[in-house]
Image (spheres, rainbow, N blue to C red):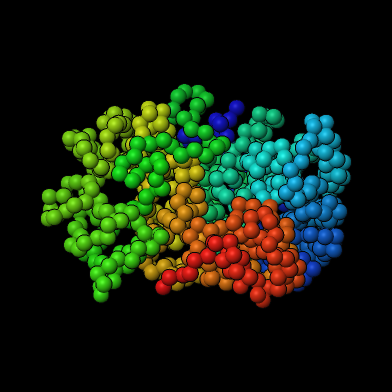
Amino acid sequence: MLQQYCRSLTEYQRLTTREVKIGNLLLGSGHPIRIQTMTTTDTMDTAGTVAQTIRCIEAGAELVRITAPSKNEAENLLNIKNELRKRGYDTPLVADIHFTPNAAEIAARIVEKVRVNPGNYVDKKKFDLLEYTDAEYAAEVDRIRTRFTPLLRICKEYGTAMRIGTNHGSLSDRIMSRYGDSPMGMVESAMEFLRIAREENYHQVILSMKSSNPIVMVQAYRALIQKMDEEFGECYPLHLGVTEAGDGEDGRIKSAIGIGTLLEDGIGDTIRVSLTEDPEFEIPVCKDIVNRYINRQQHTGTEPFVGNGKIKLPYNPFAYQRRSTNVVTHIGIGHVPVVVADYSNEPNILPADLASIGYRYDEASDKWNISDGAADYIYTGHNAINFGLPGTLQTICDHKYVQQMPGNTGLLLYTSEDYLQASIPHTQHFVSVDADAPWHILTSLMNKVKDTQAVLCIESTNANAMPSVRRFISELMQCNIQCPVILKVNSNKNSIDEQLIQLATEAGGLFLDGFGDGIWLTGKEIEEIKVSGRTYLEVKNKHQFLNNTAFSILQATRTRISKTEYISCPSCGRTLFDLQETTAKIRAATHHLKGVKIAIMGCIVNGPGEMADADFGYVGSGAGKITLYKGKDIMKRNVPSEIAVDELILLLKENDAWVEATA
């Protein structure tokens, strides 16, 4: 049996899955984590699709997916495949199918893998709440079996692999009526199709549980693994991805949190990072994520995790609940996580330096302008600040050096060793903890901080830092120690992409499980702020980068909302408008609408369902036509794309979701 949902929660071990053959590529069963992407061209444009596929392959894609929304596109896959093979490219191709079983049956005879979405392959989604008796429900599953079995038999005959790809936003009305809009609904949607495949003795199956919300995504994958293990005694390979992640740093952070959280526990056999960018730009991000787990050594803790034998966790990994804590000033349960900015390497801090962390000083009025993404604490180490700070920003300094700081009013940070020797302060203070320290130190520390005004700043020197921190926080919970916790993560990676991925994975994965009352990021200085070769013009220095990243991690984990959220699909051959250009226009017009969620979808496939979590939606409904939504409801149909952004703004205003941008 698995340890909850993976082989081990204390050591890095890949989840054992079945081996699946996709053309000449082996996946699962301990084979390397495979990288893939999806073309954005019109599938009927053979030359354009071939050219883009080659760019993806040369960037490092090991599988390339191509949409086949109808019979014509499915048939044209043969021309695309033949041209690629003629040019010497034998990378497996995947047909992406929605709604159309006939197209899937054609494609399965041509390409090496087909992807079907159980929410819309046979079932329908009209947002109707239906009532089924058990017999009626079973009859619907039989209807699916009848329609799905021919595809399985074709795949068996032609040696074609299949991905059963569940999307959170496209769960059928039938599934929604019985299981609700939940991770378990996603699991059961896939399991119905997988059971039918097993009845046909067809096992060349990969599964995915995608959502634009990383919390839902991670919980669904965990629940699917547990269900397969319980029902079959084995697991099938898993394709990981956060759907509609968006673009830029937000898309990378959201993807790293969702994908990385699972990879940390050895879960995942292939990944795709769904960015609203050209598909070849997805590949370097995939590589940076996967490279973290190549030759990864087992995580080794200084002492056993909570309990012996099969682990009984002190939290539920299948349902989000924030860890219960004391409240120390404004840190802890009932308060949003705080952000700490690290200026300990800046010996001469000036008012202008704080602009990077959300505080802009106006000398003429002697006032501070404070942004929604302003840090709550600034750590100065042993350096002093010689000017008055805004009232919303407090300093943290090393307790050893406080005597050297005339007029210091900062809060004290102790090392664990010093804290064990010191008298316990009666006011708010911070304690730095290495979660991988010798167990006797950690035990002594836990005994001393209980029922104090301590805030623990937890990091790990272990190469596998996230499991180490998770283990220690679980010990705190087991011992009913309710000190608030600030998650501290440092990255010494050499590129911004790599730093984003490490910081997002190691901090974000813990926030997804309800751990963390604050975030403190540090990173190696990098001369040029770039992501995948594109300069970040809005990021001027390391402090701004780290502060932006901290708030983006909190936004992606839904723990602190500080800006507009965009749920933007990555585009494909079904997209009915220029998605990248439109996304940029909508961002430019709405980026100041804190807390508003806007979905930007290329077509109806990723439309009403995937944007069910959004407040407003902008969906391609025909050539040059846009349909605007409020939640799941259509508000304006077939709006000409030339005026659709203006109409979206008008819709926001009509629903009191608009405020004017400030200078």
Identify the image quadrant of residue 142. Answer: top right
Query: Residue at the spot x=36%, y=52% of the render?
Result: 339
Query: Residue at the spot x=26%, y=31% of the render?
Result: 448
Identify the image quadrant of residue 246. Answer: bottom right
Q: Is residue 533 visible?
A: no
Residue 494 drawn at (x, y percent)? 42, 60
* Nearer to me, 202 or 562: 562
Query: Residue at the spot x=43%, y=56% of the render?
Result: 551
| Relative vertical location of residue 627 with respect to residue 224 in this rendering, above or below | below
| Relative vertical location of residue 663 with respect to residue 228 in this rendering, above or below | below
* Nearer to me, 538 or 14: 538
Task: Look at the image and tell me in which quarter the N terminus lies.
Answer: top right
* Nearer to me, 160 or 227: 227
Q: Is residue 179 visible?
A: yes
| Relative vertical location of residue 502 with respect to residue 544 in this rendering, above or below | above
Q: Is residue 503 left or right of residue 375?
A: right
Query: Residue at the spot x=37%, y=27% of the render?
Result: 479
Identify the image quadrant of residue 226. Answer: top right
Residue 647 drawn at (x, y percent)? 63, 70
* Nearer to me, 104 or 177: 177
